[in-house]
Amino acid sequence: MNTHGPRRVFGPRPPLPGRPARGPNPLRRRTDRIQTWCTVLFVLILAVGLPAASISAGYAAHASQLRVVAAETSARHQITARLAEAPPGPDHTDVREPRQARVRWVADDGERHTGTATVSGDASGGEVRVWVNREGALAQAPSSPATARTMGWFTGCVTAAAVAAVALTGRSLVRRALDRRRYARWEAEWKVVEPAWSGRNRH
């Protein structure tokens, strides 16, 4: 039994729990440090770059689509037209299903027009509401603000997925390149160490 207390261990003191070891690590190569910095960069891209890029792209797409909605709304308006012919008979039981029919209307300048528009099967009194442009020709209904919101969300999600894919691909390529460099260096060092370690150089 040792009566003189615990034996003193010479050498550097071990690090305290929860604290990283200080000083250079002889087992830590340059490729390891590069991989650590690439991992930090990857985390920053996912934590900061991905939200910033997706939000910016989503807001830009939303604003652009809102300008389209405003332009279409200012260039088109609704008027009342009359059916030039009865809509085709319904193929199903729901007579309210929209169908194509010939309609006629009078433009703001008094000129009479005729065209084909989408009307409901139960158009009452032969009158329907159609959209026309500034020249009085038939036009599609303008886009709604809901379309702009959908475009913004869709663009933001696609941008987030693209940023994540690029970051993951870049990280994978860097790791493969570093691994190839590690294996090449280990093989070169092993060719130097193995003869002495295995004793093949002993006589």
Image (cartoon, grey):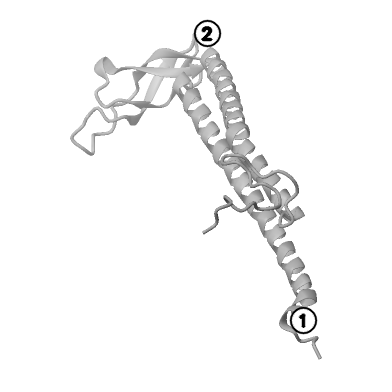
Q: Position of residue 32 (x, y in %)?
A: 70, 53
Q: Residue furthest top?
A: 109
Element on which disc 1 rests: helix
Q: Say the numbered circle drawn on residue 109.
A: 2
Which residue position holds label 1? 195
Q: Is residue 116 above or below residue 3?
A: above
Q: CA distance from mark 2 to mark 1?
A: 100 Å
Q: Position of residue 67 (x, y in %)?
A: 58, 18
Asked which quadrant contains residue 162, the reply is top right
Q: Residue furthest left?
A: 93
* Quarter of the image with the C terminus in it: bottom right
- Of 193 and 59, the residue lying toward us: 193
Q: Say the numbered circle drawn on residue 125.
A: none
Circle 2/circle 1 CB separation < 8 Å: no
Element on which disc 2 rests: loop
Asked which quadrant contains residue 117, the reply is top left
Q: Residue furthest front?
A: 3
Q: Residues within 10 Å of mark 1 (few under 14, many from 20)?
A: few
On the picture, is 183 further left or further right than 149? right
Q: Position of residue 9 (x, y in %)?
A: 65, 53
Q: Residues within 10 Å of mark 2 (few under 14, many from 20)?
A: few
How many numbered discs, if any? Answer: 2
Q: Which kind of residue does numbered mark 2 sit on? A: Asp
Q: Residue at x 55, y 41 (%)?
A: 161
Q: Position of residue 16 (x, y in %)?
A: 60, 41
Mark 1 or mark 2, which is nearer the start of the sequence?
2
Whether residue 139 appears in this view of the structure is: no
Q: Residue at x 75, y 84 (%)?
A: 199
Q: Which kind of residue does numbered mark 1 sit on? A: Pro
Whether residue 128 appears in this view of the structure is: yes
- Of 88 and 166, the residue lying toward us: 166
- Of 84 and 66, the residue lying toward us: 66
